[in-house]
């Protein structure tokens, strides 16, 4: 049985060794940000997040099939959520378009009523 720890920047489980490497980098980037800015920060510096996405994650995907599977699952979930949002947007857009058409119809009716009418001459 392999022990695993949740990655601090990603929704994946990684080996304790890789977690320690990531934590060391996180501490390094926090220290560097403090040295450069003089401000203590909480959270993850952008430099750390960039390192994770540009270096650590590609390496882990190549080395560890379990990480690759987790990334694939996360990708599939993101795609599904995006498709759901697109359906919701389309549905909402359709509803809004129908409401707009109804408003245009009412506007036309009100404008017709308010138009000055010419009186017909009696013959």
Image: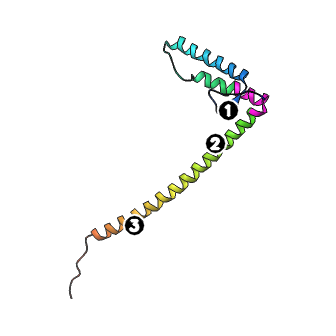
Q: Decide which of tag 1 and tag 2 comes sooner along the chain.
A: 1
Label 3 vs label 1: CA separation?
A: 53 Å
Residue mark closest to the camera, 1 vs 2: 1
**Rendered residue at 54%/52% (across/down):** 89
Local crowd size for mark 1, using a 10 Å CA cut-off: few (<14), some (14–19), many (≥20) = some
Based on the picture, tell me whether residue 45 belongs to the magenta stretch: no
Relative to 104, residue 23 above or below: above
Range of residues picked out in magenta: 56-66
In the image, taking residue 15 as reference, residue 41 lies left or right, namely left
Label 1 vs label 2: CA separation?
A: 14 Å
**Rendered residue at 22%/78% (across/down):** 119
* Residue holding disc 3: 105
The colour scheme used to paint the residues is rainbow
Figure quadrant of residue 71:
top right
Question: Percent from the top left, x then y, of residue 67?
Answer: 73, 32
Question: Where residue 12 is drawn, which disc sits there?
Answer: 1
* Residue holding disc 2: 78
In depth, the one of 16 and 92 nearer the eye is 16
């Amino acid at each position: 049985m392999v022990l695993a720890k949740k990655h601090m920047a990603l929704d994946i489980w990684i080996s304790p060794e890789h977690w320690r490497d990531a934590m060391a980098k996180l501490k390094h980037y926090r220290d560097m940000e403090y040295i450069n800015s003089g401000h203590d920060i909480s959270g993850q510096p952008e430099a750390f997040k960039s390192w994770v996405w540009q270096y650590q994650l590609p390496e882990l995907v190549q080395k560890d099939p379990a990480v690759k599977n987790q990334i694939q699952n996360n990708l599939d979930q993101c795609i599904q959520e995006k498709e759901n949002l697109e359906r919701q947007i389309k549905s909402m857009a359709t509803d809004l378009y129908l409401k707009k058409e109804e408003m245009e119809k009412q506007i036309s009716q009100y404008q017709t009523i308010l138009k000055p009418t010419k009186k017909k001459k009696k013959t």
